[in-house]
Amino acid sequence: MLKQTGENSTIDKIIEIKNKLGKEVVILTHHYQRKEVVDLGDHKGDSFDLSQKAAVDENAKTIIFCGVHFMAESAAVLSQPHQTVQIPDMDAGCWMADMADIVMVERAWKEVSKVVDTASITPIVYMNADASIKAFCGRNEGLVCTSSNADAAFKWAFDRREKIFFFPDEHLGRNTGHKMGLKPDEMILWDPEKPLGGNTEDDIRKARVFLWKGYCLVHTRFTTEQIEMKRKEFPDARIIVHPECTREVVAESDASGSTSYIVTYVDQAPSGSTIVIGTEINLIERLALEYPDKNVIPLHRSLCPNMYKISPENLLQVLENIGELNVVTVPEQIKNDARVALDRMLTLA
């Protein structure tokens, strides 16, 4: 049972409602949420961890997702018939997810089909995308992935077909392909604003991975110059970055991985270690507080304003309006097809 901290505060009211509702409500908080929101959650994690939690919690009648909209939407796809999914702020979107929509994706798929047989291509969509694109992947023998399991998703795809169409994050796709031993010229960038994505027919025939031109504004703020400066300032530091960073930044770092990987990395580092991290600032600052015996510092201060839209105040609003305010729904046909792609992802675990 959560303890109250003071009279009439927002947090006290949240705790009071949570204690009253018990297991009927579950609050999921992404690693990039501010500390006061994470402290109020039942589970914290990256989008993969939280997707699993949403899929198996049978007791909860209401799932409140403290993250951006595509995450709550995926929880709605995976939810059971008796469950409702709510998000504290409907305007908490994702720039990367907005860089690809279903019309653009279907147009690209049609263009590719004029050059190669799409039966030779597995579509993989990063979790950071609209449910309609997840549904597209479900219908076309593809799947969803997160930064935690992109390697496994690529292997799964290549075991079945010759090529991958990966969207919407070019950098996660390129970094994953590089880890699998693909050469740079085997991965081509697909610009949806250009005919054939800006490629020749020969490029498309030779390519093994098509990388949608999309990126995360948080993670593309990190540079190799910042790494160079931190190495001079902290010669003994280890530098770890998220794989949504550019290939150059990942290559210059000591390790890269999902938010859950970063958390584990810090946890297992020896006491006294200096760890420089390239990801969203809220996670880094929380890790610095949780591991005072280690020097956890940001490569650069990079905040996701969409994640920051979730606050104790709007979390309280949805708790006071259970099942009514900011309910996230997905049309049934899209939900069914998207669930196929998400279930394939969960099976990889």
Image: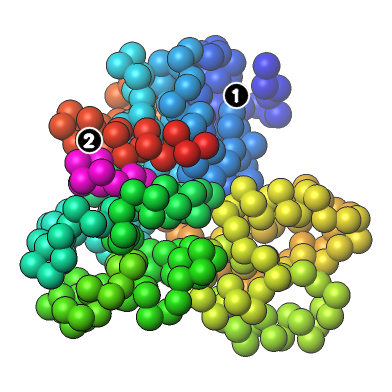
Along the viewing direction, whichever of 243 and 86 lies nearer the viewer: 243
Residue drawn at x 47%, y 39% is 348
Q: Which mark is residue 337?
A: 2
Residue drawn at x 80%, y 83% is 233
- Which of discs 2 and 1 lies nearer the camera? The answer is 2
Would you say the residues marked 2 and 1 are in contact, meaning their CB atoms lie under 8 Å apart?
no
Q: Is residue 30 left or right of residue 169?
A: right
Question: Dot 2, how many residues are within 10 Å of its Cα: few (below 14), some (14-19), or many (20+)?
Answer: many
Q: Circle 2 sits in a helix, a strand or a loop, which is it?
A: helix
Residue 17: x percent and y percent? 53, 19
Along the viewing direction, whichever of 129 and 337 lies nearer the viewer: 337
Q: Label 1, on which residue?
A: 15
Instruction: Indicate the quadrant where residue 111 lies.
Output: bottom left
Along the viewing direction, whichever of 15 and 76 lies nearer the viewer: 76
Question: From what the image shows, is residue 112 above or below residue 314?
Answer: below
Question: From what the image shows, is residue 199 above or below residue 14?
Answer: below
